[in-house]
Image (tube, helix red, strand yellow):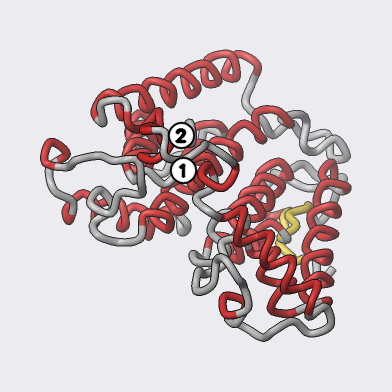
Amino acid sequence: RLLLFPLVSVLFFTLIKSPDLDEIEFKLNANFETTGGFGSNQVSTVFGAAVFILFLFVWYRWKFTPYSWLDIILLFTFAFRGLLSFSRGGMIGGALAILFVMLIQSREITTFSIKMRPSKKKLMIYTPLIIVGLYLTFNIADNLTEGMLRLRYQGETAGTLVGSKEKSLTTITSSRNDIFLEDLEVFAENPVIGVGVGLSKNHRKYTSGQLPHVEFSRLLSEHGILGLLYFLILLFQGFMIFRYRNKMFYSNVLLAFFVLALYTSFHAATRTYITPLLIGLSFIVISPKNKKKPFNEKNIIYRTRLSR
């Protein structure tokens, strides 16, 4: 709930500040009108995270609002407005996190013999409903934009449609690929301590002046070998979560937080607090004080991996 409250505020802000959808001319680029004038990439990122968190409420039968049907409406509202931002990374991230939880869903607490997952009957009901609901939401948004949304997610641009540009990894990733490769070149030239915080944009040849969108390449180019070491530590922590997943409550959620945070850093760097916040949360370990006693709130302690 604490994660969702500020995101709901952002949602209502965009609803209030955005013009009527009939007045907006949708094109094959990021849309700042549907995001209340703020950065579409950032808004899409937090909306994608909100979709995933609300999915968890539905999946585990929690309640954000007093009514489950209202939680579902809120989920699809976030998805709809996020799609209309025409920024793809955040929405793809939310969808990947949802698929991740669905695919790895199993008995999370085999050690404690506690079953903390939806029943098979609930899975058979919720899974197709959520998938169909998200698909319908996409199609409604696509029809509203007269097919522009589908073309956007196919990687088309105004140039590729008229034939003046060839669709490539550069056009599909909005030049993120070029920035990433040039950051690696900067790292190769300055492997020890990098070029300094915020200075990689000044050392690139073709993408000079453009801010890095991939946190991994930024760490390498600006911090050198120390940035690589930091990234490897993060990956090791993620591996530890996976390794001990059968000894932790809600381990699938913790893993999904880590995956979503890592994915977000590859399309939005750390422009939002989603990446550091979710990585920090993913390191939380929830386990019983006494494994012999039944699971209840009094037998649960919360501690971080570091203190462990």
Considering only vertical position in the picture, is 183 above or below 107?
A: below
Residue 36 spot, x, y in % from top left? 23, 56
Residue pictured at 53% horizontal, 42% vertical: 172
Residue 269 spot, x, y in % from top left? 57, 63
Q: Is residue 302 left or right of residue 161?
A: right
Q: Quadrant of the C terminus?
A: bottom right
Q: Is residue 65 visible?
A: no
Quarter residue 64 falls in: top left
Tally the marks. 2
Report helix, strand or loop for mark 2. helix
Label 2 vs 1, first from the N-terminus = 1
Residue 174 spot, x, y in % from top left? 49, 50
Q: Label 2, label 1: how many angstroms apart (C-alpha)?
A: 7 Å
Residue 218 spot, x, y in % from top left? 66, 70
Quarter residue 183 falls in: bottom right
Q: Nearer the viewer, residue 214 or 112?
A: 214
Residue that numbered label 2 is attached to: 153
Amino acid residing under circle 1: Arg
Considering only vertical position in the picture, is 153 above or below 170?
A: above
Q: Nearer the viewer, residue 269 or 111?
A: 269
Crowding at dot 1, Cα within 10 Å, few <14 / some 14-19 / many 20+, comes out as many
Residue that numbered label 1 is attached to: 88
Task: Kindly indicate whether the residue at mark 1 contacts the one at mark 2 (C-beta within 8 angstroms).
Answer: yes
Q: Nearer the viewer, residue 132 or 5?
A: 132
Amino acid residing under circle 2: Tyr
Residue pictured at 54% horizontal, 36% vertical: 95
Q: Is residue 259 left or right of residue 52?
A: right
Considering only vertical position in the picture, is 127 above or below 4?
A: above
Residue pictured at 60% horizontal, 37% vertical: 96
